[in-house]
Image (spheres, rainbow, N blue to C red):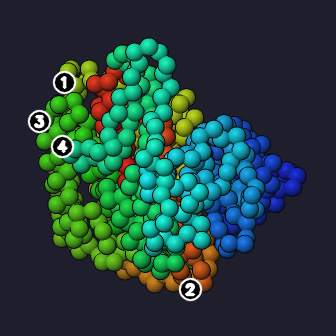
């Protein structure tokens, strides 16, 4: 009996829980608020389920809010959804004590919907901060008009940085929110009694854009532009997740050639993303030559992408039902001939870095996240795999052509900066091998079919370069988007970043930040 069948039997035995199958392998539980903590604790501790996301839906001003808690079973890919209806004035119990990965999701739901979670100690001043965002605005509710600036202002001018250390001589050292170079806005408050960071407080969302709010009422094609552009470094991955959700709603079977090309482009994006992260790591340790070598690889990959698809970041390539245009044989040959050379340069860069003792001294045992903490926080992507978590949606929830291609998953145990670097290099080699293997047998035929949408909702996912991303989409009968939920790896992994920094020296903070390779754009969506 599969894990999904076992858990289905278990759920059927729970009193006052209704169970129905949304799609094959997707079970929805209708339950009450007082059952939430018991059910979610059992899912995580007994069934070893992975938390996916928490999303809130409002159908009308009078109707109760629908709150969805989504999990999946890595063993067989079964999706578990807990759905609870919350009426005005009601609260939900916080589950973040036992499902710690849900902590930021609960804080976000309070700021954006005004949904209170009893027992949560840190509600407020999260997504909405500074003078433009007063508490109680609830910008994701239907009553809020996102086209108009609020007439009232928040209390940002009176904000006081939180301080935990009370020792004599302890200081609070701010970094950000304005950065040089290309970093997005973010404020990190480092507390120390000397040179060692004892506590770190992260304050993001300085450029919160309300992408999910803007998507409401849009056509599916226009919402795709939002999904594709909110985080340019992983544009193709997020667009692919969105397209898969829409295609599931429309019961659309993507042509075989398009599926093959989607995998090829996704892996090319992964290589470029990892090379850019490696350049940041080299730069953070003052290795200017190594940084230049990595940046040169990134630039060559971007130019190759433009020659293949007309855009350095693959904007405009994906569409519902496949791809907007095909890649001709000459372009595929160019990719097959160019990629091995770029892979060789990556291998040479890896060799040089591994033979630099001064470089290794700066990243070994630095910014370590233990396997236990990685599990507690539910981190994803290379960060998770560097801390012993064998989590990769290309294997645990295979989609597209990943269901047929063999693929290794590199896993390290140390969880430090060097482990993360090794995972980045290993994944780049694996992506190269996947592309070259896929290029040997690209099917002929069309790259797009019509995909008219209908009323319905779906969840879809992609293993983006920085980790698991989940897109939830609900559409009306005419295809208009009613709700788009973007569950990004950046939002998941920033939550755990503080734990890796505490205990490090001040001068090592930018190095740890670089080895984590976190996206502010994926967070401030």
Q: Residue at x 45, y 65 (%)?
A: 211
**Residue in front for this viewpoint, 246 or 86:** 86
* Distance of label 2 from label 1 (alpha carbons): 59 Å
Quadrant of residue 171 in the image? Answer: top left
**Residue in front for this viewpoint, 162 or 215:** 162
* Distance of label 3 from label 2 (alpha carbons): 55 Å
**Residue position marked by numbered label 3 in the rendering:** 289
**Residue position marked by numbered label 1 in the rendering:** 356
> Horizontal and vertical percent for residue 269?
31, 56
Name the N-terminal-most of marks 4 and 3: 3
In the image, which is nearer the foreground, mark 3 or mark 1?
3
Q: Secondary structure at mark 4?
A: helix
Q: Secondary structure at mark 1?
A: loop
Instruction: Examine the rendered structure and indicate whether residue 239 appears above or below residue 279.
Output: below
In the image, which is nearer the foreground, mark 3 or mark 2?
2
Q: Which mark is residue 294?
A: 4
Residue 444 appears in the picture as rendered: no
Q: Secondary structure at mark 2?
A: loop
**Residue position marked by numbered label 2 in the rendering:** 478
Residue 233 appears in the picture as rendered: yes
The quarter of the picture where the C terminus appears is bottom left
10 Å crowding of disc 1: few (<14), some (14-19), many (20+): few
């Amino acid at each position: 009996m599969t894990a999904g069948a076992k858990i289905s039997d278990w759920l059927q035995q729970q009193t006052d829980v209704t169970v129905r199958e949304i799609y094959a392998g997707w079970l929805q539980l209708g339950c009450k608020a007082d059952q939430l903590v018991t059910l979610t604790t059992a899912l995580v501790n007994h069934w070893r389920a992975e938390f996916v996301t928490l999303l809130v839906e409002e159908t009308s001003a009078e109707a109760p809010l629908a709150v969805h808690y989504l999990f999946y079973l890595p063993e067989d890919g079964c999706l578990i959804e807990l759905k609870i209806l919350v009426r005005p004035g009601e609260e939900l119990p916080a589950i973040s004590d036992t499902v710690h990965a849900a902590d930021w999701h609960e804080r976000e739901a309070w700021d954006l919907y005004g949904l209170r979670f009893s027992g949560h100690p840190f509600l407020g001043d999260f997504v909405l901060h500074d003078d433009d965002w007063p508490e109680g605005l609830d910008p994701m509710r239907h009553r809020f008009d996102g086209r108009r600036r609020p007439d009232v202002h928040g209390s940002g001018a009176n904000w006081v940085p939180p301080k935990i250390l009370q020792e004599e001589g302890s200081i609070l050292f701010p970094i950000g929110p304005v950065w040089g170079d290309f970093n997005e806005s973010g404020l990190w408050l480092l507390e120390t009694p000397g040179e060692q960071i004892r506590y770190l407080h992260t304050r993001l969302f300085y450029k919160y854009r309300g992408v999910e709010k803007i998507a409401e009422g849009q056509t599916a094609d226009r919402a795709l532009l939002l999904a594709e552009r909110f985080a340019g470094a992983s544009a193709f991955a997020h667009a692919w997740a969105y397209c898969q959700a829409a295609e599931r709603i429309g019961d659309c079977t993507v042509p075989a050639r398009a599926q093959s090309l989607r995998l090829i482009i996704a892996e090319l994006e992964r290589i470029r993303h990892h090379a850019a992260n490696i350049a940041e790591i080299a730069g953070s340790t003052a290795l200017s030559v190594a940084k230049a070598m990595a940046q040169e690889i990134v630039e060559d990959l971007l130019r190759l992408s433009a020659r293949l698809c007309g855009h350095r970041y693959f904007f405009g390539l994906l569409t519902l039902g496949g791809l907007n245009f095909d890649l001709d044989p000459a372009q595929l040959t160019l990719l097959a001939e160019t990629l091995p050379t770029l892979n060789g340069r990556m291998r040479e860069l890896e060799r040089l870095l591994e033979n630099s003792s001064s470089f290794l001294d700066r990243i070994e045992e630095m910014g370590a996240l233990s396997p236990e903490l990685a599990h507690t926080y539910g981190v994803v992507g290379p960060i998770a795999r560097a801390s012993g978590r064998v989590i990769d949606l290309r294997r645990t929830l295979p989609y597209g052509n990943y269901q047929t291609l063999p693929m290794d998953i590199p896993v390290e145990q140390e969880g430090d900066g060097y482990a993360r670097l090794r995972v980045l290099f290993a994944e780049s080699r694996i992506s190269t091998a996947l592309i070259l293997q896929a290029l040997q047998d690209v099917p002929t035929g069309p790259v797009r079919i019509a995909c008219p949408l209908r009323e319905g909702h779906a969840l879809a996912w992609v293993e983006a370069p920085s980790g698991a991303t989940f897109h939830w989409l609900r559409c009306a009968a005419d295809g208009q988007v009613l709700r788009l939920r973007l569950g990004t790896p950046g939002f998941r992994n920033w939550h755990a970043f503080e734990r890796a920094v505490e205990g490090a020296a001040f001068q090592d903070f930018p190095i740890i930040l670089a080895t984590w390779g976190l996206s502010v754009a994926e967070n401030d969506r």
